[in-house]
Image (cartoon, rainbow, N blue to C red):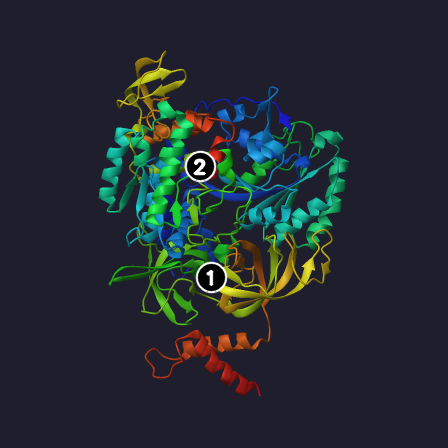
Amino acid sequence: MPLTDRSSLVNHDILNRQCTFHAILTYVSRLSHLQALEAESIHIIREVASEFQRPVMLYSIGKDSSVMVRLAQKAFYPGPIPFPLLHVDTTYKFKEMIEFRDQFAAELGVKLIVHSNTSALEAGANPFRLGTERCCGLLKTQSLLDALRAGGFDAAFGGARRDEEKSRAKERIFSFRDSLGQWDPKNQRPELWNLFNGRVEPGESIRVFPLSNWTEMDVWQYIHVENIPIVPLYFAKERQVLVRGNSLIMPEQDFVKPLLGDRLETVRCRMRSLGCSPCTGAIRSDADTLPKIIAELVAVRNSERENRVIDHDREGSMELKKREGYF
Amino acid sequence: MAAALVQQPTPQSFNIEEFLAAEESKGLLRLTTAGSVDDGKSTLIGRLLHDAKGAYEDQLKSAVRGGQIDFSLLTDGLRAEREQGITIDVAYRYFATPKRKFILADTPGHEQYTRNMATGASTAELAIILLDAHRGLTTQSRRHAFIATLLGIPNFVIAVNKMDLVGYDQEVFNRIRAEFEPFLERIGTKDYYFLPLSALKGDNVVDRGTHMPWFDGPCLLEYLETVETADRMIQAPFRMAVQRVVRPDQNFRGYAGLVGSGTIRPGDEVQALPSGRRSKVRRVVTFDGDLEMAHAPMSITLTLADEIDISRGDMISAGAPPQSARTFDATMVWFDAHPLDPAHDYLIKHTSHTLPARVDGVRHLVNVATLETEPAATLAMNEIGVVRIAASQPLYFDPYRENRVTGSFILIDRKTNHTAGAGMILAAAEGSLEDAADRLVRLVRAAIPEGSHLNLPTDDAQAMEVVRGLLKGVLK
């Protein structure tokens, strides 16, 4: 029985039919913040499943995706999740992520689509040769748009949160994309109450962000109270890393090559957010349990995307990527 | 715009178990801010975010100009905003204290303020109306208060900012309060808190400061942490719009939705609308187990004791029934660049229901600055007025002032798919034949016993035709 505060709702003393209506009301506490966020997200997920022809849920294997999938399970319980998951695989992900993904999808019994931009990969696309900006453009953005077009998907759920980055703070929960998959931040549909406008013409689509109002702290607390499985890379242990300035890069696969000045060291560290292994650094940490991760979060004063090389390519780089179709 | 960077000490005696226990019962307050750039809104929000750890160190670093934090750089997220030094759109901010979590809809005060304010206010329980002590009460402040009231926000903080510029003079504060109070009363706001502060110097934001010993009320953050936001939606009659029928196999048929208002328990008698059929709640189903009670705004799945026909867009209600009407009056805020057009086809989205609709005339326009009503044939972008809406089928609603969920709707332009406007239902249009026929169809349907050979056509349009004929006979 996660979200333990609900136990107050099944207290039989309260439910004695002799109680007056108002006596009951004084017992009905307002929802806790996690319960309120959960209820809102479930509502969003159900609206999409009911209003769109072919929705799909982007699954990035990260902690936010894991929470989003749990919310989808809750939304349709006791029925199954009525749409597939889609993983856009750059082929540069951490090995542990791919193992986790395949096991997770099998246990859940949900359909998982894996899409890679094979033509770009065959042409030799990689972050070392192209730089991170072009590499992301081909292996993530282009690949995602291709996968959405190939599947004929008119709505795609993403696990992005508004607290992650400045341009995301202004994105709608239902975010309209034109037929080229582009976002126009100055021309967004007003979004009031919980009434979402998901009307699109053929070729156009909506990106849906059910976790818009969650913070990083909310996500971790929810994973903790709900016991949601996550990739072990999030937990601290001794790992071999390349120390590159302030970054700790894990050379766990052949394509991660040391650069001049890198030092190979064994460091107790963990990943705070997951991406491609050449471009996502670990942080020094002792947090090997969920409570320790949460405790670390209380003390830490840097945002989780700080270790992501790609956000810092240039001023407003996330907004530019999003305009072109990135999640 | 700038304030000194204050280093936060890391908590010394932090106990994770205590922290997690406290977090689990922590509530959520949704609020909105309104004020123009010059009122120091960015500075105030920046300070709240900074002091309540809603902003991270690397984000702060990127907002430092000349050794000080420029809080507007922290909050303005789009390139065009940073280039032009203005705020364009509603931005959502998140911060927390040991007592509460906050979601703040930060709305720009100048450009397209009506549209943005209405958006931010629609989900908020509290509004901070920010004004500049130096400039005093402006038309802008009145507009902000009016729009927030219109959207049904019950609690207000009137933050009289820049007290440092008027020498922390109690007289200035009292004068502004005396001038603003009658206006607030006139628009129907009852729960408001006047607070003198200086966002720049930090007085009465997170700490009391020493400059205004004459004021003994709580500072802003303390007020936000403790303000009682009585949840009217829990106390209203039960309403749940059905989002989806959950039917994994022959043995289970559940109705999934978000409890819009009220409470529900197994055994409660409910009515399905539009069919009017009654049944009892059998189970309140969730992934985490059945509940003995659910209330607004929980997402649940209900199963009923009887097999009755319910589908997406229908409403399950208990207690006093909602009103029903195909034609009704509503206050509308217009968003679209194309003005409201009675000859145009729109869609109305109300709860989980989307229907064709027309605008059956504009009753009047509201001048937001003077609150005077003016005759008008249309509403242009950012204008507010009272209009008559005619939907293709009856809606089941409560007036917006009683129920924000069943009383709200949006109009969608059928040609462009834009969200053209947002509406708050006032009342059913009286005396229309359509509405009388709709009500009669529902009464007759509910009165006919299950399995009876007597019945109305199941198709609503055909049923209406029959009943309209009957009614015409009655009215002759």
Q: Position of residue B213 (x, y in %)?
A: 69, 31
Which residue is identified by label 2? A215
Q: Nearer the viewer, residue B408 or A316?
A: A316
Q: Nearer the viewer, residue B164 or B292?
A: B164
Would residue A59 be seen by someone viewing this image from the given angle? yes
In the rendered structure, find residue B354 and report the number of the disc placed on it.
1
Pointer 1 chain? B
Quadrant of res B82: top right
In the depicted structure, whether residue B380 falls above or below residue A327: below
> Tag 2's secondary structure?
loop
In the picture, the quarter occupied by the C terminus of chain A is top left
Q: Quadrant of residue A78?
A: bottom left
- Mark 1 vs mark 2, CA separation in Å: 32 Å
The answer to whether residue A90 of the structure is visible from this angle is: no
Q: Nearer the viewer, mark 1 or mark 2?
A: 1
What is the chain identity of the residue bearing mark 2?
Answer: A
Percent x, y of residue A40: 43, 48
Q: Position of residue B346 (x, y in %)?
A: 53, 62
**Left or right of B141 in this view: A42:** left
Q: Quarter of the image holding residue B220?
A: top right
In this view, B47 is above or below B147: above
The amino acid pointed to by label 2 is Thr
- Image coordinates of residue B205 in percent, x first then y, are 61, 33
The type of residue carrying mark 1 is Thr
